[in-house]
Image (spheres, helix red, strand yellow):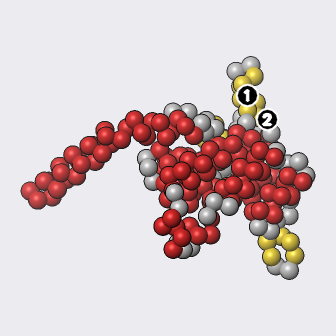
Amino acid sequence: MTHHVKFKRAQLRESIESQCKGSIEQKISRYLEIEHQGIIGGHHFASASSECIYLYRDGYFIGAVMMSHAINEGIMKFVAERNSINRSKGGGNTKTIEELISEFREKNIISKKCSEASMKIWKSFRADIHHMNPTVAEIPFQKLAQQNLKHLSTIEKEIFGYEIKDGAMAPHQAKYWDIKTDGTTTVFLRLE
């Protein structure tokens, strides 16, 4: 490693350490204010959901909003699958997330609180953000990220709610957990 690279590396280390130390209290506050579900099913969206929390914690609000949209949609598609809801509406078209949420609510698959949380994420400038329309310059991303992650927390608590009985986790809705014949299940832990 050349002297120039060593110097640049040391300079970058100092800058990153300073940034981390200077924002640690804000990061802790943002992490705690979400009140996310500590354990969720180990499904395809679990890792993304956890990373979304870290994006918000670390101040990457645009990324957190974009991920919250995708995770919300992924969870709603998962709910459709687990409840044998056909996502096709004929003519080669697929139901929108909004249509699925309405159907879930009509069939009492999810609560009003959960459906409202999901719809609020769905309607939170999704198209503008994903297409980077000029209106994104006016979006208050920090506030929107906070709101969306709190809504996502509401959704995950309903879908992956559980209690501890006799030292074991007992899911409120077993259909959303892949419970094996021996009673175990794969989980994604977020217990920091």
Q: Residue at x 80, y 39 (%)?
A: 173
Q: Quadrant of the N terminus?
A: bottom left
The quadrant holding residue 20 is top left
Q: Nearer the viewer, residue 53 or 118?
A: 118
Amino acid type of disc 1? Glu
Amino acid type of disc 2? His
Q: Secondary structure at mark 2?
A: loop
Residue 192 appears in the figure: yes
Q: Residue 175: horizontal and vertical position, in percent? A: 81, 44
Mark 2 and mark 1 residues within 8 Å of each other at the beta carbon: yes
Per the model, the C-alpha gap separating discs 2 and 1 is 7 Å
The quadrant holding residue 189 is top right
Residue denoted by label 1: 163
Q: How many marks?
A: 2
Q: Residue 130: horizontal and vertical position, in percent? A: 57, 69
In the image, residue 33 sits, relative to residue 139, either above or below, namely above
Residue 41 appears in the figure: no
Please state if 9 lies on the left or on the right of 130 as rendered. Answer: left
Q: Residues within 10 Å of mark 1 (few under 14, many from 20)?
A: few
Please state if 106 lies on the left or on the right of 189 as rendered. Answer: right
Q: Nearer the viewer, residue 191 or 132?
A: 132
In the rendered image, the residue lying farthest to the right is 107
Q: Residue 126: horizontal and vertical position, in percent? A: 62, 65
Q: Residues within 10 Å of mark 2 (few under 14, many from 20)?
A: some
Residue denoted by label 2: 172
Q: Residue at x 79, y 35 (%)?
A: 172
In the rendered image, the residue lying farthest to the top is 166
Query: What mark, if any, has residue 37 been given in the picture?
Result: none
Q: Residue at x 72, y 25 (%)?
A: 164
